[in-house]
Each structure stands twice: as C-alpha cells, then as structure tokens.
Amino acid sequence: MDAALRSMRTAHGTTMARQAKTILQGGLQLAVMANVIPANPVRDVQSLRSKTRPKGATALSADQLRTLLAEIRASEYCAGNDLADPLIILMATGLRRSELLALRWSDFDANAGTLTVTGKLVRATGAGLQRIDEAKTAAGMRTVALPSFAVTALRHRQGRDYVGQQLMIFPSTAGTWRDPNNFGKQWRAVRDDLGVPGVTTHSFRKTMATLIDDNGLSARVGADQLGHAKVSMTQDRYMARGKVHHEVADLLDATISDE
C-alpha cells in the first residue's frame, strides 16, 4: 500500500496521492467495521508530504537592501508613481501593506522618530476600500521606532504640496486611501528593473525578521516590531509587551543608511 501510493505521488503528484489515500482509508475502514479485515492498512502508510517546501517570500541580505534603497531613490518610475517613500518605510519597518497604506500623518511623531500603527485597510463588500481602527492581531497596534533615513524621508514628504496636506501619509492620486493591490502591481512592474525580480512587498517583513535574528536581537523584539501576537507562551507571560524598540531603528541605520 505504501509503495503504491508513493509510486502514484511520483507519477501524478502529491495532491492526487493524498486524495487516493483518503479514499482508500475511508473504504477500508468500512471493511474493518464489517469485520472483513482486522485492521486498516492505510494507517501504516507514511505521510505523503510534498518533497519540496512551498517557496515563501525572499529575504534580502544587508548588502542587497542597501543597494535596493539606492536603486529605489534613483528610479524615475518610483518617483513618478509615488513608490519611493512607501517602499522606504516598508524597508524601515517591516509593516504589512494594509498597515502601511493606512498610516495617517497623526501616526507619525517626527520628534520621537516613531510611527504608530493604529489601523489597517480592508475591502468591505459594497463599500470598497475602508480604513478600520483594528490590526490583524492585538499586538498589531504598536509603535515602531524609525531609522533616521526613514524619518528624513517622512519629514521631506510632509513638507510637500498635496501629500503633506492629506489625512493619510500615502494617498492615492485622487486623495483617497491607496489600494494595496494596486500598490503591489506597481511594485511588480518595477522590481525587475531594480534588480530584485523575486522580491515581493512581503519580503521586506521577512527581511526585517531575518536582520533582527542575525544581529542577536530577541524573538520578542521581532514579534513586537512586526506585530505578531505570540512568540511562545513563556515569552508572552514573562517578557514585556508593547515596547518601542529603538535598537531595531539603530540596526537599520547601521545596516543600510547612507546618512
């Protein structure tokens, strides 16, 4: 039975083999219940997991991140489509797209050098794109310290006509909330030219987590920075939550800033 299912996986793929296993297990279980056979042989079949793990977002190295920052700043496409500033803030914070594009100027404290995540964008049936005062998790409502290059970018942006006068930090051209899906399409349209064809907007979150881990900062720091609800039960119970981690901003400055 095991050999037959593995042969099927090789010939037709993991999904078909697992479906066949499920059907066989159900049919043979009826035979067990009818006392036709003493035990269900499918229970002894080993797991039919895929041999390859699903490919997740690509994390960038410090050198790649530094190079990409320079490429974004120099890109005419990024400048013309108002991509540079939001991408810089993604790189500096690891925010989710829905959090990034829900940021308001009232969430930015230039003197403290922080951004406070107070909501996210959602698509409501019949109402279109809406901002709600909720995060993906309770831990998602957080204050994030910014590296100096991000503070500089936001200060400069705040002084510009139009965008500096809107409620939101990253408005659409119509002055409404910017669609995360359209933002993603714009990124995909330019990433090849920037030399990062496999990088998604989620890659910046993964990069942030990797930098934190590689530089010896704790998993709790990473969870607070990224707005994750849990690291482990022990850490949730005995380590402080909701702190502003300036060490993450310092790390980004040391890693990629040219200021």
Image (cartoon, rainbow, N blue to C red):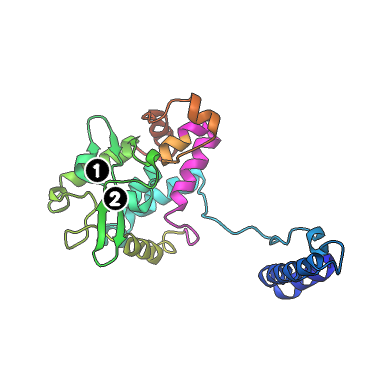
| Residue visible at 55% across and 36% down in the picture | 214
Q: Is residue 228 part of the magenta span, yes or no?
A: no
Residue 96, percent across and down? 38, 50
Label 2 amino acid? Answer: Asp
Asked if the stretch drawn in magenta spans residue 218, the answer is: yes
What stretch of residues is rendered in magenta?
196-221
The residues tagged by marks 2 and 1 sit, at their Cα atoms, a distance apart of: 8 Å
How many marks the image carries: the answer is 2
Look at 27% across and 46% down and name the residue there.
133
Check disc 1 and report its element: helix, strand or loop: helix
Numbered label attached to residue 85 = 2
Residue 236 vertical position relative to residue 195 in the rendered view, above or below: above
Relative horizontal placement of residue 132, taking residue 244 as reference (left or right) = left
User: The C terminus lies in which quarter of the figure?
Assistant: top left
Q: Amino acid at mark 1?
A: Leu
Q: Residue at x 60, y 59 (%)?
A: 54
Name the residue carrying label 1: 154
Based on the displayed image, in which of its 4 quarters is residue 1 positioned? Answer: bottom right
x, y (%) of residue 112? 26, 29
Please tell me whether residue 6 is drawn above or below residue 152 in the rendered image.
Answer: below
Asked if disc 2 and disc 1 are in contact, CB closer than 8 Å, the reply is yes
Q: Nearer the viewer, residue 257 or 89?
A: 89
Asked which quadrant contains residue 115, the reply is top left
The reply to whether residue 145 is in sight is: no
Image coords of residue 247 (percent x, y): 42, 29
Q: Nearer the viewer, residue 76 or 214?
A: 214
Question: Counting other residues with Cα less than 10 Å from the Cα at mark 1, is it few (<14), some (14-19), or many (20 or more)?
Answer: many
Residue drawn at (66%, 69%), measured in percent from left and top?
15
User: Residue 113 is drawn in which quadrant?
Assistant: top left
